[in-house]
Amino acid sequence: MPKNQQESHKIQAWSLINRKYLGQGVRVKRFRRPKRSQIRNRVLLAILMAKDIKLSKLAEELAVSSRSVSAWVYEGRIPSRNNLEKVCRLLGYPSHILFNEALLRQSPIVCQPTPSRFMKRTLAHSPQNNVILTGLCMVYDFSVTDVSVWIGVHPGTFRKWLHQCHLPTLALQEKAESFFRIPRNILFADCDLR
């Protein structure tokens, strides 16, 4: 019997030691950095990132589990009709933009020529009227300048698309569509919804 008490004492001592070191808290980033192949609903994640809405906060607002919201973004699942209406009402976009079935099935990966880094001050100092396009730059961690060079437009022109919700010509819309691999009616939906 004393041997058993001694073993339980050791377990309690180790749990206190572990609590001391592990209970310090871990700094968690606002959004986890997923691999590109893990994102199935890039548009929904782009809107959430641009509006700074965490997945857990969205789940709380909709009264669903955070696992369900994660499945919508990372697995490409489509919510039930009731939850679909709630998401659309909360985010202010129609369902064919938030949950486009063709995009969810394909989920293509954007091929960037060189590494790039999104500048946080883009959000802090400038208005973001094209939420989807801004959010996609955040999802892929693309610099505004780099994207404009890759697409083949002047950086000031691309900034007008982001900040003033300027609708580009059809030829430039097609260039952006071929780069992001998202239909232009979704990519520039904020310009049409204004």
Image: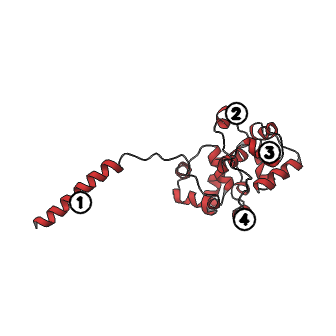
Earlier residue among tags 3 and 2: 2
Neighbor class of circle 4 (other Cα within 10 Å; few <14, some 14-19, many 20+) is: few
User: In this rendering, which labeled residue sits more in front, label 1 or label 3?
Assistant: 3
Q: Residue furthest top?
A: 125
The residue tagged 4 is: 106
Residue marked by disc 3: 149
Disc 3 vs disc 2: which is toward the camera? 3
Report whether 40 appears left or right of 2: right
Residue at the image point whose x is 65% and y is 35% from the top: 121
Residue 151 picture location, percent across and down: 81, 48
Under mark 3, the amino acid is Val
Scheme of image coloration: secondary structure
Identify the residue position indicated by label 1 in the image. 11
x and y, in percent, of residue 130 in the image: 74, 42
Q: CA distance from mark 1 to mark 2?
A: 55 Å
Question: Which is more toward the observer, 40 or 61?
Answer: 40
Instruction: List the residue tagged with mark 2.
Output: 126
State the separation of the CA atoms marked 3 and 4. Answer: 26 Å
Q: What secondary structure is found at the residue carrying circle 4?
A: helix
Q: Amino acid at mark 4?
A: Gln
In primary-sequence order, the first of circles 3 and 4 is: 4
